[in-house]
Image (cartoon, grey):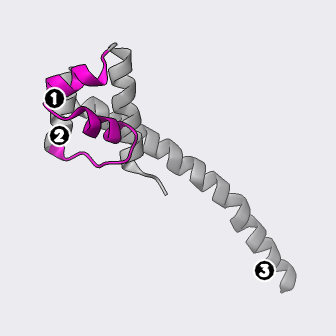
């Protein structure tokens, strides 16, 4: 199962680190507790739209960029999952065809 919050956390953490910001700096800029941001980055907590907007502002990153990156990661994960299901489906067809 694809967890949106896990990918969102990865994207936010990567953005923070690329900007050389600490959790404390983002916490102050977003006016969100450091612990809560840490939980979001680790995919343990969901971010409301308001909280996400505050984090994006603190990271000086458009929300659309964050969502685009998360969407891309979700698409890649879904494609990988689909590829792993194809052999199983093909094997099932072989079993059905050989039994007929």
Rendering coords of residue 59 (x, y %):
23, 22
Which residue is at the front of the view, 89 or 26? Answer: 26
Alpha carbon of mark 2 to alpha carbon of mark 3: how far?
51 Å
Magenta extent: 21-49
User: Could you tell me if residue 17 is visible in this image?
Assistant: yes
Please give left or right for residue 15 compared with residue 59 in the image.
Answer: right
Of mark 2 and mark 3, the one earlier in the sequence is 2
Which residue is the extreme one toward the bottom? 100
Residue farthest to the right? 98
Residue at the spot x=21%, y=31% of the render?
A: 55
Q: Residue at x 30, y 33 (%)?
A: 66
Badge 1: residue crowd in 10 Å (few <14, some 14–19, many ≥20): many
Res 9 → quadrant: top left
State yes or no: discs 1 and 2 in contact (Cβ < 8 Å): yes
Between 35 and 86, the residue placed more toward the observer is 35
- In reply to whether residue 35 is colored magenta, the answer given is yes
Magenta span includes 11? no
Q: Which residue is mark 3?
A: 96
Q: Which mark is residue 30?
A: 1
Q: Would you place residue 50 above or below residue 93 in this image?
A: above
Q: Which numbered circle lies on residue 51? A: 2
- The picture places residue 70, in percent across and down from the top left corner, at 37, 39
Q: Secondary structure at mark 1?
A: helix
95 relative position to 76: left or right: right
């Amino acid at each position: 199962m694809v967890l949106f919050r896990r990918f969102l956390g990865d994207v936010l953490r990567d953005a923070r680190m690329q900007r050389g910001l600490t959790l404390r700096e983002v916490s102050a800029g977003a006016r969100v507790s450091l612990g809560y941001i840490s939980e979001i980055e680790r995919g343990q907590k969901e971010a409301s739209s308001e909280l996400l907007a505050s984090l994006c502002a603190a990271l000086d990153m458009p929300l659309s960029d964050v969502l685009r990156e998360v969407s891309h990661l979700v698409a890649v994960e879904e494609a990988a999952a689909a590829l792993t299901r194809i052999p199983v489906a093909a094997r099932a067809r072989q079993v059905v065809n050989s039994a007929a």
